């Protein structure tokens, strides 16, 4: 027995107790236990205990589903009549014995065009990421040099999930920024900023034809915004925003555009240097826009504005504009500009922060 056939026999022996597995018959008489997870024009992706095997379609006779232990008692090599009837790729339907799958019924492999290592990575994510969730890891760097050197590092982990017939939507973004400043080669200041932003949106209506064109739809929604941050650049020890907005979201599939906006009441707790702990009542507006203007590029923009309802000289504004390039199937490259302006703080605190960050993003789905 060749070494290759010995390995396949060993694999079958290990997995023979898996009642829900499938048995794949090859023309050379070998049998493999596992699961067909996809196919392209000439190859089947077969998931086994040893990993994903890419098996040429013209070497496959048939696949037996169900009780592998019972199937293992069958002859290792199908009869010559079966092989002749099966043909080079999948076989005629009439030649399939009871309990087998016609190979043409196997769903297409969504990652057929990817290199083998990338396919295995995608299948690994598919098997290990909780169902319905999409995660993303970001890492960015910023460098500035004038009479001093400023180096900033940005990291974030975000995720989102839709459920309930896509009527419920939850998003979160956990971030950490670290900044180090040097003057004449000596570290003079080190600051950091971190926080968590969460959004829960409940659609109050199903998709309705948009008044701006038949190709678009809109939904009415109720949204809860809950954010926490600590920002030593601005002297903020703790800041919590809790808001509830009522708005509408528009989607135009033909052009790749999505837009949403909603106003509402909010409350903020802020504890900052030189500023007593305060509760602030605000009116807020939250707005988001995205445009997939071609297959690999997306424009993103968001805005959050809050106004102190008891002191109109105090308000907060967070603005973001970004361009995201889908560089590969496992990595995006993003260039983002942010402008944060906040006067709901002590009078001597930093009120404005502008940043331009180049980030590398890795979708985990």
Image (tube, rainbow, N blue to C red):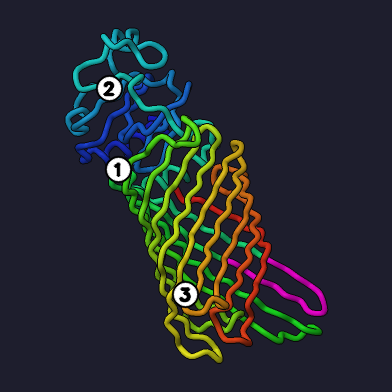
- Picture residue at 27% right of the left edge, 22% below the top: 101
Can you say whether 131 is above or below 235 in the image?
A: above
Residue picked out by circle 3: 309
Q: Residues within 10 Å of mark 2 (few under 14, many from 20)?
A: some
Mark 2 vs mark 3: give the one in front. Answer: 3
Give coordinates of residue 160: x percent, y percent: 41, 54
Label 1 vs label 3: CA separation? Answer: 37 Å
Q: Which mark is residue 101?
A: 2
- Picture residue at 51% right of the left edge, 78% below the top: 230
Decide if residue 87 is in sight here.
yes
Q: Quadrant of residue 135?
A: bottom left
Q: Depth check: 341 or 55 in front?
A: 341
The magenta segment is 142-154
Q: Which mark is residue 335?
A: none
Can you say whether 319 is above or below 341 in the image?
A: above
Can you say whether 49 is above or below 68 in the image?
A: below
Q: Horizontally, is 96 left or right of 306 in the view?
A: left
Mark 1 vs mark 2: give the one in front. Answer: 1
- Decide whether the magenta segment is chiefly helix, strand or loop: strand
- Picture residue at 36% right of the left edge, 49% below the top: 162
């Amino acid at each position: 027995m060749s070494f290759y056939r010995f390995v396949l026999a060993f694999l079958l022996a290990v997995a023979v107790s898996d009642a829900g597995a499938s048995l794949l018959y090859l023309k050379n008489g070998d049998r493999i236990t596992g699961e067909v997870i996809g196919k392209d024009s000439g190859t089947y992706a077969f998931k086994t205990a040893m990993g994903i095997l890419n098996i040429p379609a013209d070497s496959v006779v048939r696949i037996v589903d169900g009780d592998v232990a019972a199937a293992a008692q069958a002859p290792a090599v199908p009869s010559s009549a079966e092989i002749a009837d099966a043909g080079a790729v999948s076989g005629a339907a009439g030649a399939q014995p009871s309990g087998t799958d016609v190979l043409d019924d196997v769903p297409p492999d969504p990652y057929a065009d990817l290199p083998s290592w990338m396919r295995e990575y995608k299948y690994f994510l598919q098997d290990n990421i909780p169902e319905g969730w999409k995660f993303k890891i970001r890492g960015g760097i910023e460098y500035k040099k004038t009479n001093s050197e400023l180096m900033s590092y940005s990291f974030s982990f975000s995720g989102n999930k839709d459920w309930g017939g896509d009527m419920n939507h939850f998003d979160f973004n956990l971030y950490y920024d670290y900044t180090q400043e040097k003057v004449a080669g000596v570290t003079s200041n080190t600051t950091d900023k971190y926080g968590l932003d969460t959004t829960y949106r409940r659609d109050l209506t199903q998709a309705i034809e948009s008044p701006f064109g038949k190709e678009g739809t809109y939904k009415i929604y109720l949204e809860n915004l809950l954010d926490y941050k600590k920002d030593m650049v601005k002297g903020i020890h703790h800041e919590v925003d809790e808001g509830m907005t009522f708005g509408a979201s528009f989607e135009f599939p033909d052009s790749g555009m999505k837009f949403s906006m909603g106003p509402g009441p909010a409350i903020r707790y802020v504890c900052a240097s030189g500023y007593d702990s305060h509760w602030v009542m605000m009116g807020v507006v939250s707005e988001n826009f995205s445009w997939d203007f071609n297959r690999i590029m997306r424009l993103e923009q968001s805005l959050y504005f809050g106004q102190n309802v008891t002191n109109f000289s105090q308000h907060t504004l967070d603005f973001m504009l970004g361009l995201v390039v889908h560089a590969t199937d496992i990595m995006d490259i993003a260039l983002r500009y942010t402008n944060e302006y906040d006067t709901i703080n002590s009078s001597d605190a930093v009120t404005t922060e502008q940043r331009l960050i180049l980030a590398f993003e890795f979708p985990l789905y």
